Image: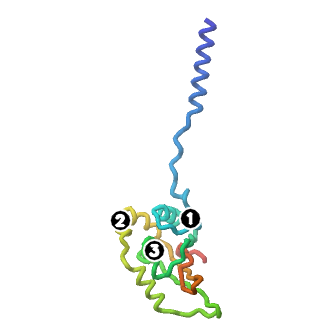
Amino acid sequence: MRHVLSIRWSLVLLACLALSACETNPSAKSPQDDATPIVAFLDADKFDHQLSASLSAPMNEITVPFYDKVSPNNMPERMKAWVNQVEKSGGKIQMTEPTSSSGVTAKNPFLIFSMINAIRTLVQLEQKSEKAKVLASAKGHDVKILLAYNAQNEVVIDKIVFAKKGAAN
């Protein structure tokens, strides 16, 4: 009889240990988990999701640095879609030109007009409903495009900063 009770208690103890070792389902990952104040530009869907998460998070500014410095006229289509969405939702687009080596900033209105023209072009990525949902997080933001000179003394995009409207810069 004792032997049977001992076996039962052993089985109960073993069952309790086995159940306590079981892992519960991990909690669902929140989009806010991917939110960071710096989202380096990469021409991939992951970039869209990271930027969307960061724009949806309670941050005043999100900076997008570029690995490859490109001319403002050759802005990647993926980035054009984001900047275009900011403009469509009532945000402002500001271009900050680099200072020249002489300390004087040359004002080239054609550069600014061509950039705004390029931004206004319809982007195929925007037409997809999933893409539109991701881009919707750009609402309520302004964009500052910071330009710089590359080694060949050409004007290129250094980084783009998305700032919540009304946030102190």
**Lower sequence index among marks 2 and 1:** 1
**Lower sequence index among marks 1 and 3:** 1
Residue holding disc 2 = 128
Q: For the residue labelled by badge 1, is the local secondary structure a helix, a strand or a loop?
A: loop
- The residue furthest front is 152
Q: Residue 66's x, y, as percent?
A: 55, 73
Q: For the residue labelled by badge 2, is the local secondary structure a helix, a strand or a loop?
A: loop
Q: Amino acid at mark 1?
A: Pro
Taking depth in this image into account, of 63 and 153 the one nearest to the observer is 153
Sort mark 1 into few (<14), some (14-19) or many (20+) by Cα contacts within 10 Å.
Answer: few
- Closest to the camera, between mark 3 and mark 2, is 3
Residue at the location (55% across, 61% down)?
35
Give the CA distance from mark 3 to mark 2: 17 Å
Residue holding disc 1 = 58
User: Which quadrant would residue 103 be assigned to in this image?
Assistant: bottom right
Image position of 128 with respect to 155: above or below: above
